[in-house]
Image (cartoon, rainbow, N blue to C red):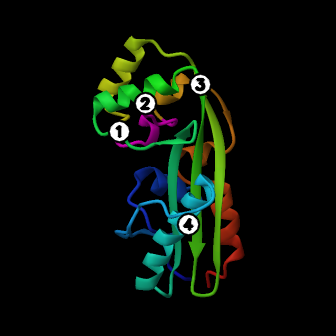
Amino acid sequence: MKKIILASKSPRRKELLEKCGLPFACMPMETDESLEQGDTLEEKIRLLSERKACARLDVNPDAVVIGSDTIVTLDNEILGKPADREDAKRMLRELSGRTHRVITGVCIVSAKRKYSDVSVSEVTFAKLSEEEIDAYAASGECDDKAGAYGIQGLGGRFISHISGDYYAIMGLPLNLVYEELKNIDLY
């Protein structure tokens, strides 16, 4: 069986890929994470996931490599990982009572095949009080997450509606990855 490599250090992506029931190794690759020129944010994030996967494939040419990246956008502005707790509070205030988009790009590549796509989901936050924002920021959960929240953790209590792929919002469109892995000759 070909080695499957997840080119990511994200514990959430690792946890999600484990749900596919296939053995894999986490081997992040330091790559330029700036968004390339592209017509849309979707295209930019797709290209970034390709860059990550292809960089790891260059080092491990006999493997099947999965690269992924996620961005949170509000009014076409990217809300990255917060710089500090005050930045997290600012983002949460912006998200409060509004719907934003989560765009996750994924690329699965081997020596014989390359597949890349994006999953776009919409997430609606309930209206948050300053006390809720302060408490959530103080929890530390938002520190390393795009958009300053994690849907799978304490941040999930603020979400009133999603349209799209829950797992892609977490960082990896699980069904999309699983279906594509079934199409790749792993043996």
Give yes or no for residue 101 being in the magenta stretch: no
**SS type, badge 2:** helix
Which class describes the residues within 10 Å of circle 2: few (<14), some (14-19), or many (20+)?
many
Which comes sooner in the sequence, label 2 or label 4? 4
Q: Hey, what amino acid is under mark 1?
A: Pro
Which comes sooner in the sequence, label 4 or label 3? 4
Proximity of marks 1 and 2: CB atoms separated by less than 8 Å = yes
Name the residue tied to disc 4.
47
Q: Of residues 40 and 145, which is closer to you in this image?
A: 40
The disc at residue 91 is 2
Would residue 164 appear left or right of 48 to someone viewing this image? right
The disc at residue 82 is 1
Total numbered badges shown on the rendered structure = 4
**SS type, badge 1:** loop
The disc at residue 146 is none
Name the main secondary structure of what is drawn in magenta: loop
Please provide percent x and percent y for residue 147.
46, 38
Please provide percent x and percent y for residue 6.
47, 67
Q: Hey, what amino acid is under mark 4?
A: Leu
Q: Hey, what amino acid is under mark 3?
A: Arg
Seen at 65% across and 42% down, the residue is 121
**SS type, badge 4:** helix
> Visible in this render: residue 21?
no
Please provide percent x and percent y for residue 148.
41, 35
**SS type, badge 3:** loop
Q: Hey, what amino acid is under mark 2?
A: Met
Seen at 58% across and 68% down, the residue is 107
Q: Of residues 114 and 183, which is closer to you in this image?
A: 114
Report the Cα–Cα distance between label 1 and label 2: 8 Å
Please provide percent x and percent y for residue 34.
42, 60
Name the residue tied to disc 3.
98
Proximity of marks 3 and 2: CB atoms separated by less than 8 Å = no
